[in-house]
């Protein structure tokens, strides 16, 4: 493996469900060490793209590479080196937070101390509590702790701010920065636009399964008529509205 290869590389990737193109000829490159925000409205294809990266889904056409590997052929290698917080996940209600993290550590053959990871995400007081009594925000924090097991080279977070209170949002943001400073590439999808602009090196806007804009927030502002002090929300709406007007959303 060439360490200079991108962390994520998709070349003309399409994923079809019947006549619907959930992802449509998508070209995407995320370099090693980047923090990349993947934005789009519900149904834009963000979670489908993440599923393709992890071999949860197979592309209809095109090429997917993760950390220099084909996830279809090298799925174990990819999953050992990637930490994932999925948009939807299941937990064992009768098991503790500690047991959940320990299970992932065993699967990855990692030496992480579950208590340290749970403390890091703000669950230090609930290490041995059964997960069935957790709030949705606590479940999200637990899933993040599980994603951090093994010091992953690539951290994929699908809607990491979902169900998390303001303190939890701040903690997630801090962890993203810490992981990036450690050397990890961080790729996360979100519709919480204000959080994305605070932590990301670059932002990609997905709409109708296609990447309609990409760059820094300043780059994206330059593509619109928005003023220099426009919020990310203003820029996002203008970019996606323009795409709809051009007929770009074919679904």
Image (cartoon, rainbow, N blue to C red):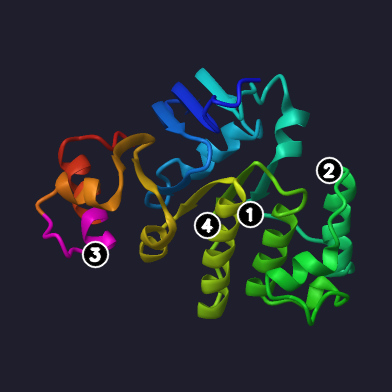
**Whether residue 91 is visible:** yes
| Residue designated by label 1 | 88
Task: Name the residue: 43% across, 49% down.
Answer: 37
Q: Nearer the viewer, mark 1 or mark 2?
A: 2
Q: Nearer the viewer, mark 1 or mark 4?
A: 4
Nearest to N terminus: mark 1 or mark 3: 1
Residue, disc 2: 108
User: What is the C-alpha distance between the residues marked 3 and 4?
Assistant: 20 Å
State which mark lies toward you, 3 or 4: 3
Residue 148 lies, with reference to residue 192, above or below; the image says above
Q: Which residues are magenta?
A: 226-236
Secondary structure of the residue carrying tag 2 is: helix
Residue 238 on image: x %, y %:
18, 52
Tell me if mark 1 has few (under 14), some (14-19) or many (20+) residues whose alpha carbon lies within 10 angstroms of its own: few
Residue 94 location, x and y as percent?
A: 89, 69
Q: Looking at the image, which residue is at 75% across and 29% down? A: 77
Residue beneath disc 4: 159
Q: Nearer the viewer, mark 4 or mark 2?
A: 2
Residues packed near mark 2 inside 10 Å, few (<14), some (14 to 19) or many (20 plus): some
Q: Nearer the viewer, residue 250 or 199?
A: 199
- Looking at the rendered structure, the secondary structure element under dot 4 is loop
Is 169 placed above or below 160 here? below
Q: Position of residue 166 (x, y in %)?
A: 50, 78
Q: Disc 3 marks which residue? A: 231
- Is residue 58 inside the magenta stretch? no
């Amino acid at each position: 493996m060439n360490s200079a290869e991108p962390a994520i590389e998709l070349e003309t990737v399409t994923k079809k469900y019947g006549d619907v193109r959930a992802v449509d000829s998508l070209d995407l490159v995320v370099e090693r060490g980047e923090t990349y925000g993947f934005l789009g409205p519900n149904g834009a294809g963000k979670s489908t793209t993440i599923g393709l990266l992890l071999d949860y889904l197979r592309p209809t056409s095109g090429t997917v590479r993760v950390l220099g590997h084909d996830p279809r052929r090298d799925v174990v290698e990819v999953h050992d080196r990637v930490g994932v917080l999925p948009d939807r996940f299941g937990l064992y209600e009768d098991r503790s937070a500690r047991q959940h993290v320990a299970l992932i550590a065993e699967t990855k053959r990692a030496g992480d101390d579950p208590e340290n990871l749970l403390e890091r995400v703000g669950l230090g007081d609930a290490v041995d509590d059964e997960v069935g009594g957790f709030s949705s925000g606590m479940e999200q924090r637990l899933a993040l702790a599980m994603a951090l097991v093994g010091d992953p080279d690539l951290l994929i977070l699908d809607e990491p701010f979902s169900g998390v209170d303001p303190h939890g949002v701040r903690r997630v943001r801090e962890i993203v920065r810490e992981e990036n400073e450690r050397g990890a590439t961080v790729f996360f999808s979100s519709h919480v636009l204000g959080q994305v602009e605070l932590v990301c090196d670059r932002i990609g806007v997905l709409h109708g399964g296609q990447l309609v804009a990409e760059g820094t927030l300043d780059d994206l502002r330059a593509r619109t008529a928005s003023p220099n002090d426009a919020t990310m929300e203003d820029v996002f709406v203008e970019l996606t509205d323009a795409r709809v007007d051009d007929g770009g959303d074919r679904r």
